[in-house]
Every structure is written in C-alpha cells, then in structure tokens.
Amino acid sequence: MEISASTIHSFYNSELGKIVRQETINNLSDAMEGHHLSKVCGLGYTSPYMTFLKESHPQCIFQEMFPDFLGAIIKDNLDFKQEAVDEYFLPIEPSTVDVIILSHILELVERPETVIEEAWRVLKPNGLLISIIPRRAGIWTRYDNNPFGFGRSFSKKQLSYLLGSFFYLDSSYYYLYTPPWNNFFNYRLSSFLEKIGPVTVPFLSGLKMEVSKKIIYAKPNQRKKKSSLQRNLVTI
C-alpha cells in the first residue's frame, strides 16, 4: 500500500475502512457536542468526517485541505470547499477557525510541530484542535494493509510533548479495538469488540482522538530556536 489521497480514499471504501470511519464519527460527535461552530477545517485526509459534520451542522462553513504530499484532491460530489495546500503555511487568516481536524497528517509529515503551530495560528481563542493519530501500542500500526501502518505512531507522552506548548488537553478518546484483519467474522464482530475493548484490552486501541483547546498565550518553545513563523505569531 502506497500512501496517497487515492489509496486512503480506497481504504475508507473497504470494509475495514468503514469500521474506522464509523468509530471515528461516533467519537467526533461526542467531542463536538455543545460547541457553537461557524467554521471547521480539516487538514490531511478528512473527507469522511467532514461529510458527516456538514450534514449535522448545515449552517457551518467547511473546508478540507489536502497536503501536497498526498497528491491529487479526491473530489466525490462533496458540498464543501477542497484545496491542495502547503501543510506548513495554511491559506487562512489568523484566529478565524472554530475547529481544526487533523487526520492522516501528523504521522506522515516531516515537521509535525510546524503543523501544530499553524493550527494554533488560525484557530480562534479556545478553538478546538482534534487530532486523530495512530497509537504506538495499538496493533493497527503493525499492519501495512491500512494507512495507519505507515509513518510514525505516538505514545501518550510524545503527543503531550508535541501539543503542550500551544494547546491544553480537553478530552481523549481511545478506540479501534477491532483487529485490522480482512475477514467476514472480524467485520461482524467489530461492534462487539469496540464495546468490550475499553474494559478488557484498553492498551490495544489502534487510534486516539485528542481534543485540545488553544492556549491564548502560547508558551515559548524551548525545544528549538524560534522559526520565522513563530516570531510572526500574533499574540491574541
């Protein structure tokens, strides 16, 4: 499997991909419940989730941004704006977005910390950053029949280290206890496995959804010298 927008698109149309999509949507619904939204942006490959949110929040503006490295944009009669972007320089004005959803991006880019800085720049004060990332302890990263088997995976400490200078944790969701096996019984048992997984094998969840809120005054990043982007960040 080669990672591109077309292969990820094909995955989400497979039986395994449908399981991932449904479980992510279930958690996304919980994460966004009660939030007033006017503009939501997805960065990476987020079409399945943006489509769902568009249906449940018809008054909201939605925009999906494909990073250049994923190749061509996959247009599927979607009722929201899609465009190819440089993932390190988003074409959005500062402090104008309510929610940013990151999916198939942090594990694949060379500089995930710069993606996080850009997300901080364009989010409104107390805006939500929803990061969908593969877990290092999960089994999905050990198979190459799915997009999460490519790129880096994250431990809890690594993700906290990545987000901590610009965001604070609001909530976390662990899910995808169904193994990445292509067989009929696995598909039929997925709902049952997702229910009992958090109780029986909580350490084996394949994905984590980290919901974070923007820190109004970002902490100085001591890990490296300030980039030109950091120097130009506007204090809200």
Image (spheres, rainbow, N blue to C red):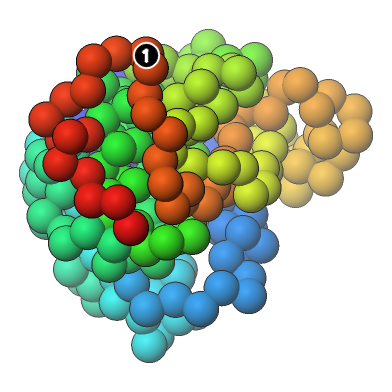
Q: Regarding mark 1 in the picture, which secondary structure is present there? A: loop
The location of residue 232, given as percent across then percent down, is: 15, 41
Q: Could you classify mark 1 by the number of other residues whose Cα lies within 10 Å: few (under 14), some (14-19), or many (20 or more)?
A: few
Q: Residue at x 37, y 63 (%)?
A: 124
Quadrant of the rendered structure where residue 183 is? top right
Q: Residue at x 32, y 26 (%)?
A: 112
In the rendered image, which residue does mark 1 sit on? 223
Q: Residue at x 61, y 42 (%)?
A: 169
Q: Residue furthest bottom?
A: 59
Count of labels in the image: 1
Relative placement, left or right, of 31 versus 190 is left
Q: Nearer the viewer, residue 194 or 171?
A: 171
Indicate whether 139 appears above or below 165: above
Indicate whether 199 appears above or below 145: below
The location of residue 206, given as percent across then percent down, is: 61, 28
Q: Amino acid at mark 1?
A: Arg
